[in-house]
Image (cartoon, helix red, strand yellow):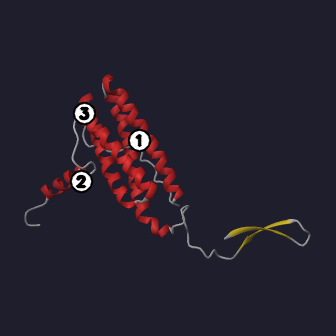
Amino acid sequence: MSREIRANANGRADTRADTRPDDKPDRTADGKAKADREPELKALQAALRAEHAAVYGYGVVGGRIGDERRADARTAYDAHRARRDELRRTVRGLGGEPEPSAAAYALPFPVPDSAAAVRLAAELEERVAAVYSDLVRATEGARRGAAAESLREAAVRAARWRGGSVAFPGLAERSRASADGAAGASPGA
């Protein structure tokens, strides 16, 4: 329904709800039908979930990291907060409702000291890179460029934390998960 402003018989403005249904399907800000944006919205929501987890994870990293790497952790934390906020705006702009963050996230391993905090930071970046590689595939235009830039930034941060890089950032996490799943499968399955 839309609202129209008309002049009534007395010449005064009359605002009444127009009860005619809109002929246009639900559209996003860029003019595409919302149904056409579902794969993109799913990938954006996955990236948002990853950024929520990274922000949480860097809170843990910051509490355990040594003084010599604390500035790196703070810079990464700020970058993930900015990406999270940007993703929220993008999801809203496409007509979606941004997923809220969880109260807490399960860590992949205990983080009792600075060395474990460095490993966690690298792991967070690799996981974020994996999600952004999916987002690159699901988007186009400027959003694809932004997703590729986010993938690059996560890969660079992961390399800095780990001290080395991988051939295809964002895919290493998937290959590890696939290998873990295959190792747990029984031979007769």
> Which residue is drawn at the image coordinates 46% and 65% (left, top)?
37
In terms of depth relative to the viewer, which is nearer, 54 or 185? Answer: 54
Check disc 1: other Cα within 10 Å, few if <14, some if 14-19, many if 20+. many
Q: What residue did someone put label 2 on? A: 174
Q: What residue did someone put label 1 on? A: 80
For badge 3, the amino acid type reads Ala
For badge 1, the amino acid type reads His
Q: Element under label 3?
A: helix
Q: Element under label 2?
A: helix
Q: Position of residue 174 (x, y in %)?
A: 24, 53
* Quadrant in the rendering for residue 70: top left
* Quadrant in the rendering for residue 20: bottom right
**Distance from label 2 to label 3 (Cα)?**
22 Å
In front: label 2 or label 3: 2
Q: Position of residue 64 (x, y in %)?
A: 31, 29
In front: label 3 or label 1: 1
Give the answer, above or below, for where 152 lies relative to 99: above
Q: Are marks 2 and 1 in contact (CB under 8 Å)?
A: no
- Sooner in the amino-acid sequence: mark 3 or mark 1: 1
**Distance from label 3 to label 1 (Cα)?**
20 Å
Q: What residue did someone put label 3 on? A: 116
